[in-house]
Structure formats: structure tokens, C-alpha cells
Image (cartoon, rainbow, N blue to C red):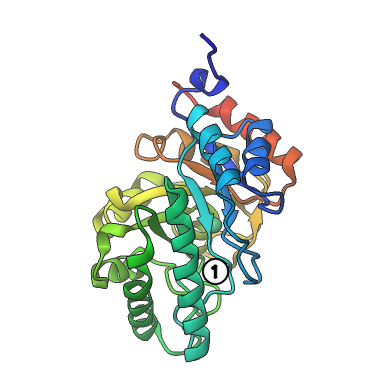
Amino acid sequence: MNKSISDTRGDFKVGCHLSFAGGYAKMVRDALSIGANAMQYFSRNPRGGKSKPFDAEDAGKLLETAEKHRFAPFMVHAPYTYNPCSANEDLRRFARDAMSEDLQLQAKIGRSFYNFHPGSHVGQGIEKGVELITEFLDAVLPYAGDTVVLLETMSGKGSEVGSSFGEIAKIIRAVKNPEKLGVCLDTCHVYSAGYDIINDLDGVLKEFDAVIGLSRLKAVHLNDSAEPFASKKDRHAKIGGGFIGLDAVARIVNHSKLRGLPFYLETPNELEGYAGEIKLLRSIRKGD
Ligand SMILES: [Zn+2]
């Protein structure tokens, strides 16, 4: 029997953000070439351009390889240009139409997460921001198919919504289809938002559980932070190369409440750098 590499890798699902420029099959080949069994990519050009026409044959190759190598669900990331709680109605409509289209496309592929930044309320206040994001989700979630839409935890720069677990919980509680929602915890963002994942990871996860519920936590964006604790700044650093450090990262990837989740790197790297980080992470992971 031909035993695939991932069969010997236990349950640790780890990968990174990849370029979709060469299509699906190329992207999953890139993932395999760097030892990944998880992958993230932008739903379309990050500046918010048109999405590519759907290529069913190319997508078929992606699915075949991902199944064979037991990949984690694909993590599709919305462009940063979507602001679901903009004060400008045209910008909100743009985000709603584009995300609806992204979700319809992703539903054709399946086995996916769709991650988005809740947005910036631009002076309207958190309450109004939460209300607009809820309205937005009520409009787009019907297009999600079996894709789980993830709210990302944010650093709180500017007027970002979603830098506290309470804000995320409010959105989840207010939408009509909460069963379609989950949360992606970004280690850089929560650290810069003021959650002490270095000295009190247990306490942070306990709080997450009490406020949102750990069953909502579906994935981790694994990044070090180039900015200090509670800085409210969003600048990712390479694994072990920032304020979070490798010891804390080791506790994160081995934590009993997190180790079953897929980890997606968004560190400042090219493929070669990601290969090194994935190798490093596999070496500090225990017990698979
Ligand atoms: Zn992230």
C-alpha cells in the first residue's frame, strides 16, 4: 500500500497563506512542497478586484490532493478592502455583494472556512458597528452552503470591531443563522489586543469559553507579533521572531484546547521561509 506522507503526521494540521495566482492545483502542490496540510488563500485579489472565473477541473485536482493528504478545511480569506460596517452605504454594499459572490464560489468547492475581518466602525461606535455587521451577515450567510464563516479576532487598531471576545459574541448572538458562524483566533491580534497568551493562555481560553464558547473556535492564525503586548497594533512577525516568542508558540500548538484545530501561518515569508517554520512547528509539537 502506498502510504502518503501525511498518514505519518498524526493530527497536526499546519500550513500557511499561499498565492492563488497559479490556480488551485498549483497552490496545493506548493502546500505539499513545504510540508503543509492546511492552506489559506485570498478569495480574490486582496485589493478587491474581480474574482477569477471558476475552473471546475482545476478545483477537482485541488480536492483530490487535499483528500489524499488529509488536509484541514481550506481557509479562504476575504480581502481587507471589505468593510461590513463602513459608514458609507456604497462600501457596505460592495462588501456584501463581493462576499456573497465569494461564498457562492466557495460552496462549489466545499470543505472550507471563509475568514473575514469584522470591519472598522469609523467613528460610528461599537454598537452601530455590531449592528451593521449583523445586518451584513444576515444578508450573506444564506449563500454560504456548508462553508463555515469565521469572524477573526482583531488587534483593535483604529476603530476595528472584534478586538474583544465580547464584541464577537454580540455579533454571533445577534445573527439569524449563528450555526454558520465560527471564530478564527489570530495569536498576533489577540496579543496586541491585550489578551496575555504568553503568561496566561489557560486564562485567555477560559475567558473565550465563557464569553463566546470554545465550540465556536475553528482555527488559529499562528503569527508572532512585531509590536508589544496590548499595543493595539497589527504587525505580524516570523515565528519566534517577535514579542510572543517560540516558548509561547510551543504551548499554543500543544495546548489541549487548541491542538486539534488547524493552524494557518500569516507570517512575513516566502515559500522557503514557510517551509522552515512548518518544519520548526512540527519539531516542537508533542505527542502525535
Ligand atoms: Zn489573521
135 or 239: nearer the eye?
Answer: 135
- Quick one: 16 or 257, which is closer to the camera? 16
Q: Residue at x 35, y 39 (%)?
A: 257
Q: Is residue 265 above or below residue 36?
A: below
Q: Position of residue 202 (x, y in %)?
A: 35, 44
- The x and y percentages for residue 59 are 56, 45
Work out which residue is located at the far top of the displayed protein and give it: 1
Q: Which residue is mark 1?
A: 232
Total marks drawn?
Answer: 1
**Residue 200: in sight, yes or no?**
no
Residue 136 image position (x, y, % from top left): 38, 77
Question: Residue at image x 56%, y 49%?
Answer: 40
Task: Look at the picture and state if 80 lies above or below 257.
Answer: below
Question: Is the CB of mark 1 within 8 Å of ligand 1?
Answer: no
The residue sitting at 49% across, 59% down in the picture is: 105
Tell me the quarter of the picture where residue 164 sits. bottom left
Left or right relative to 131: residue 57: right
Q: Is residue 46 above or below residue 56?
A: below
- Residue 69: percent from left, percent from top: 52, 28
User: Who is closer to the viewer here, 225 or 184?
Assistant: 184
Split into quadrants, the picture shows ligand 1 in the one at: bottom right
Taking the spot 37% from the left edge, 52% from the top edge, the residue there is 204
